[in-house]
Amino acid sequence: MTSLAAGADADLVILGAGCAGLSLAARLARSQHRLSVHIIEPRTEYEDDRSWCFWRPERHDLSDLVSHSWDGWRFSGATGPAVHHRVEGLRYQYVRGSDFYTRARERIDASSDITLHSGVHATGLVSLGEGPGAIVRVETDRGSIRARHVVDTRPRVMPARLYQSFAGVEIESEHRLPFDPAEVGLMDAMATDAGGMHFRYTLPLGRTRALVEWTRFSATPVPSGILSAELDAELARLGLASARVIRREGGVLPMGTPGDLPDAPAGVVVAGNSGGALRAASGYGFLRIQKWAQACAYRMQRGEPPVGHPSEPWLRRSMDRIFLQAVRADLERTPDYFLALARGVPPAGLVRFLSDAALLPDYARLIASLPTVPFLRQLAPTAVPPVRDLVRA
Ligand SMILES: Cc1cc2nc3c(=O)[nH]c(=O)nc-3n(C[C@H](O)[C@H](O)[C@H](O)COP(=O)(O)OP(=O)(O)OC[C@H]3O[C@@H](n4cnc5c(N)ncnc54)[C@H](O)[C@@H]3O)c2cc1C
């Protein structure tokens, strides 16, 4: 651990070296414009604690981090036929957390201007002034540091319309697994019970290896012990109780934060999940974080202050809100809603919707696919959008 010199100055202090903090720092590490950056991170060791999936064409700027990809994905209910989707030219892609962390840290280590302080907790932020140009004192359990700018990616508890709670295991079996290796089970065996809606998410990583996750959508977060027990029961149902567990991942993702995010102190930008990176309707955040990191690094290279995540365009925000409220109001019917979307919206349109790229006809198909009455009930008046937001939608 590098100790922080009391009163040291930095152009930028990043709180948290997870997905968002590392993405920004790794981009700044490769920039010609030299900025002194300090990253504060409590972890001393990185584990393979998560994986990130997204839809992209085969080749893109992160292709070298993709360890697996599939050209098909599936939705299914407790009974009845599954709905199979694929989109010409698009693949569902998988980045291992360990690969992402290693590469980002290699880039950071190669830069003499960026220092990662592992094993350090940020404990407070004090703005030493007001408005643009305010210096911020970052307090940690190992001393304090004064920064021109702070990007804060620390996790925080946030109220949400709905919570996506999940527990998963990467397993290796001696026998061939009962999954089609060419297709992801995006939302399999969707059903409801007293605890809300649940489904299985399956990423086949080979004929004998897979990541299997048990997921719940519910009005309150589900404790990890309950989810793990349900995952074990699901593995047993699939005949996989004796499969070797290679690693575990899980978490609780807030879906749709009611109201605005709290204001940050002067000189501080909040980013990552805490700054609005998660897409309300899906819980996907990885590509949104990459896009933000690119934009933020670009600005800082030009000598401008860092930026947070862009606000959600009105149409997308409203669709997500209506959808989440309808789901929350009647969790029993949620599997029907998702199956209706899978059947009624062309796969390319549904992927565009989930990937923040929906076109007006995609929204029209989405609305036409869903039952009218429960969704109309959620149409409480919302503020009239500025025209520019409608255009961006
Ligand atoms: C298991 C899992 C799987 C996911 N899968 C996907 C997926 O497939 N696709 C997708 O698009 N999105 C996915 N997400 C959602 C989202 O992309 C991730 O949550 C992503 O890691 C968010 O990045 P972040 O930087 O906001 O948070 P994190 O990556 O959690 O980083 C926050 C960092 O802050 C640090 N920290 C905590 N306390 C302090 C402190 N006091 N001081 C300084 N630092 C502190 C933490 O140690 C951590 O390193 C997943 C989320 C989880 C949890």
Image (cartoon, helix red, strand yellow):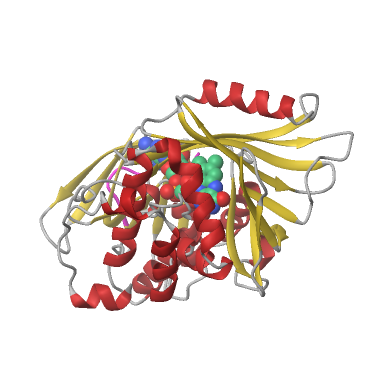
Q: Is residue 244 above or below residue 81?
A: above
Quick check: is 5 in the magenta stretch?
yes
The quadrant holding residue 154 is top left
Locate residue 383 relative to residue 140 in the image: left or right. Answer: left
Locate residue 92 relative to residue 116 in the image: left or right. Answer: right
What's the magenta region?
A: 1-10
Q: Nearer the viewer, residue 80 or 30?
A: 80
Q: Nearer the viewer, residue 206 or 319?
A: 319
Quick check: is 301 in the magenta stretch?
no
Residue 121 in picture, x, y percent from top left: 39, 35
Residue 314 in picture, x, y percent from top left: 26, 65
Residue at 28%, 78% in the rendered image:
391
Residue 74 in picture, x, y percent from top left: 65, 53
The quadrant holding residue 92 is bottom right
Q: Residue furthest left?
A: 130
Residue at 40%, 68% in the rendered image:
363
Q: Is residue 156 above or below residue 339?
A: above
Q: Is residue 117 visible?
A: no
Residue at 50%, 54% in the rendered image:
340
Q: Is residue 99 above or below residue 224?
A: below
Residue at 18%, 50% in the rendered image:
265
Q: Nearer the viewer, residue 183 or 46?
A: 183
Locate residue 137 relative to residue 171 in the image: left or right. Answer: left
SS assignment for the magenta stretch, majority: loop
Residue 386 in picture, x, y percent from top left: 17, 72
